[in-house]
Structure formats: C-alpha cells, structure tokens
Amino acid sequence: MGSVGVSWQGSGLPAQQDELLGFLERLAVANDELLKEYPPPPDEYDLVARTPQQRERLRMRPNIDRINRAIAEGIEVDSSVFGDRGEFVRGAEEIGLPLVGVEGPDADEGLFVLNLNAARQRIAVRLRKASIYGINFKIFGVGYPWYPGEDRVSFVFLHCPEVLFLDGRIVDIFHRDELPGLIRFDTIRGSDWYASSADIHLREELYLGWFDRFFAWVKFFFIPNLRWWSYEDLPGYDRLRAEFAAIQGQVGPAIARAAIFDDILASFVSQAQAHKSSRRTIAGRDEGGAGLSGRTLRVLRESGDAD
C-alpha cells in the first residue's frame, strides 16, 4: 500500500474566494458528518505530537475551521506557498523584502515522511501584519491510523495588500500555541505565526484520483494559477480541462461548475461510504470520478446536448 503527499499552491481574487468557499462548505460539512458518525479514537495524535500541549491542541481543533482573522503579529511565510521557489525569491527581492534562510528540514516535515528531494535550507519572509480568510477542514478516512495530523484540506487565503506577490495566496496557517499542527516551531525563531503550502498525505487507493478531479475543477472555474502535485504536476488536467470546457460550452459556466461539483461531492461521499463500511475501496487515480455522471449528465440531457 503506497502513499503520496499532495500539495497545492495558487492565489485567488476576493470574489473567486467567496464563491469557491461556498462550495467547499458543503464538502466540509459532508466530512464533518462522517467524522462525527465514525470518530477517530482519543489517542489519535499520541504518536505524532511532540508535547502534551501539542497533542491537546490537535485533538481540540474542530473538524471544520472557518477562519476570518486579522493578525497584527509577525508571520513567517515559507517559500513553499509557491510551486516555484525562484518566483517567491524574485517577488521578495523586487520589493526589498528580506529573505530568511534557515538550515535544516522544512518546519512542516512530518515525523514519518522522508523526502529525499527536500531542500536542506528553508527560505521564508516575515510579514508584520496580514489577515487570513477561508476554510480548513478534516478529511474522513485519511488520518488515523496512517497519517494523523496530515489529513486536512486548507483553502485559507492570505491577505496582505502591501506585499502584492503574496496577496491572495492559499496557505496552511499555524500558530505556536493556538494552531500548532505538526509544525516544528523550534525551527521558527522570529514569529509565532507560520504559513506554508497546503498539503495532505493520502494512501494511493483512497481519494487520490478524486483529488485530481477536485483540484482540476478548482483550477478551471476559480483559480487559474492553481498547481497541485501528486507523483506529477497537474495530473490529468489536460483531459479534465477539455471535459469541463465542453460542458461549459453546452450549458454555461454557472450551471457547469455547480453540476460538476455536485458530481464531485457525490463521488467523494460514495468513496467515503465504501471506506466506512469495508475499510477499503477500489477507487484509484483512474476511477476518481472520471467521465460524465449524476447531475452533470442530467443537465446535459435536459439541454439536449448529451448523447
């Protein structure tokens, strides 16, 4: 049974953020209902938490974390929020923002993950203030017992108009005391807040193909510069873009994005139900909701464009 770390980066405008978050709320609620029906055990984080305080904070974090907060303290923003570290460095240099270099692994490198390609020097910048807005939610069936603490989806947007190259960036946000996650705060000296790329740790046979389709939907309809990686960059996107464009051309963008999302949500619930009942699923990358189904097909039939 293999696994893969899936990470994503991108930025969105406020109107795009609001509409996307409306859809994501439905996905978050579906996961919350599943997690309440089949909750992980109280000792879920015992093997990964470095301190009792960190374990308690991890345990107390709600399944759905709706975030809308102004931060008037220092925030360290890691270069991983860009898919291309060079783009991050150029953005900082263009406005004269000092780069912070720290020897050693990334602050969010997990206990059970050995990344041989990881940079040995972390590059970041520090902001004096910013605001954060979005949603962070736990995915059913991903964490315990395999990867506890590496099972959340973050679409939290960093707002910092004075630092334009970071404004609107998707981040995963952490605080030394309030939201420690699995972050190694001993490597972060000058800030209590830390922002890095969003990521999740998946087993190959559960949700991997589903995430490819989900991210393709986000990229096509909301965040054109979204990048995600799972074994490769933007897996399956050329095929999915063509499929989404054809549907959009037949029924228009509003109906297309809603209908496709309905199918994406139904596909997730179906895979989660299979995992819930049998603790295994046959869904892999190729079966991750590909092709027309459910509401998308009904919409096309009603428009007279489906075969």
Image (cartoon, rainbow, N blue to C red):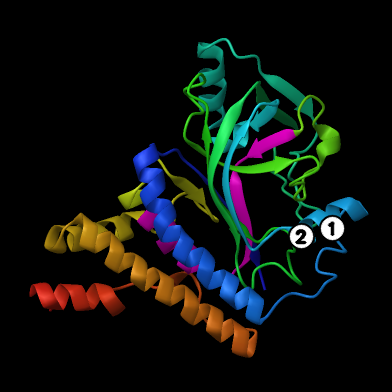
| Residue bounds of the magenta highlight | 193-218
Q: Are marks 2 and 1 in contact (CB under 8 Å)?
A: yes
For label 2, the residue is 60
**Amino acid marked by disc 2:** Met
| Residue 126 visible from this viewpoint | yes
Which class describes the residues within 10 Å of circle 2: few (<14), some (14-19), or many (20+)? few
Q: Residue at 74% across / 40% down in the picture?
A: 175
Q: Is residue 78 magenta?
A: no
- Note whether 200 is above or below 175 in the view shown: below
Relative to 116, 34 lies left or right: left
Q: Amino acid at mark 1?
A: Glu
Identify residue for label 1. Answer: 56
Label 1 residue SS: helix
Report whether 241 appears left or right of 170: left
Quadrant of the rendered image containing residue 242:
bottom left
Residue 213 among magenta residues: yes
